[in-house]
Amino acid sequence: MKAVIFNSGLGNRMGDFTKNNHKSMARLKDGETIFHRQIRLLAAEGITDFVITTGPFEEQLKSEAADFPQLNFTFVRNDIYDKTNYIYSMYLAREYLNDDLLFFHGDLVFNRKLLHDVLACEDKNTATVNFEKALPEKDFKGRVKDGKVVEVSIKIFDEDCYAFQPFYKMDKYTAAAWIGKVVEFIHKGEDKCYAENALNEIFPALNVRAFSYVDYFIDEIDNLEDHARVTAEILAYDEADAKIFD
């Protein structure tokens, strides 16, 4: 399995920090950056191959990756990151994505047990959903029917919609179907929307199971308030995980 981390965004809601830094360079309370933490946890779970899409501050990401010489990194730069959404970065990276894949965004902080259990789950295709958390106003929601995720959008608020994080495990066939739709969108000139817009066209025909993260931690750091909250909340999960994995 290969991990794909989308790190091509601007992250301009982090104030002065992102004037000179990639958002994933934000540090948690133990001093580790978001990106370094992601790589460390994935490596601990046996992932050795990474595809990293980049935009601004690419060298910062490469410098962090250099701490893991035993791993294989492919960096794919989106030169028009300020004019496109990550759907275009996925399009640029498509030739490296012919594998079982773990997709997620570079601003996600998650605990190791979540990663471990997603990878160990017998379902080959999963996406993370929280059936108890209040629906976020501006962030992704997932529509779930019969245990399957059938739509992801920021605009859906129905009774079968739940808090959602863009953390996907997909076998290579499902991933290829998504990438195929991404290619169609880009060829139509639709490069400013979410990659989920393309996925939604085929979601109902796929078998992407909802993986509940009620008992785990996964959240994005999108602004300074998120950074303060997430860096505080992850500590208890890391302490619990240390008793399991260390």
Image (cartoon, grey):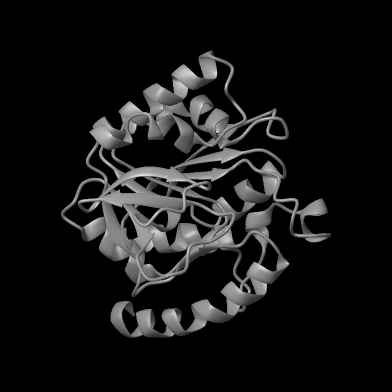
- Residue 165 position, x and y percent, is 45, 56
Identify which residue is drawn at 42% across, 80% down: 237
Residue 70, placed above or below residue 30: above
Identify which residue is drawn at 32% across, 36% down: 203
- Residue 154 position, x and y percent, is 53, 48
Identify which residue is drawn at 32% across, 30% down: 202
- Residue 10 position, x and y percent, is 71, 45
Farthest residue to the top: give it.
187
Q: Which of the 4 quarters of the picture holds residue 35?
A: bottom right
- Taking depth in this image into account, of 149 and 165 the one nearest to the observer is 149
Do we see residue 70 in this rendering? no
- Residue 62 position, x and y percent, is 61, 46
Residue 142, placed above or below residue 82: below
> Image check: 2 left or right of 85?
left
> Image check: 130 left or right of 52?
left
Q: Quadrant of the N terminus?
A: top left
Q: Quadrant of the C terminus?
A: bottom left
- Taking depth in this image into account, of 59 and 90 the one nearest to the observer is 90
- Taking depth in this image into account, of 212 and 91 the one nearest to the observer is 212
Identify which residue is drawn at 45% across, 17% down: 184
Do we see residue 129 in this rendering? yes
Q: Which of the 4 quarters of the picture holds residue 188?
A: top right
The number of numbered discs placed on residues in the rendered structure image is: 0
Farthest residue to the left: give it.
122
> Image check: 2 left or right of 17?
left
> Image check: 183 left or right of 98?
right
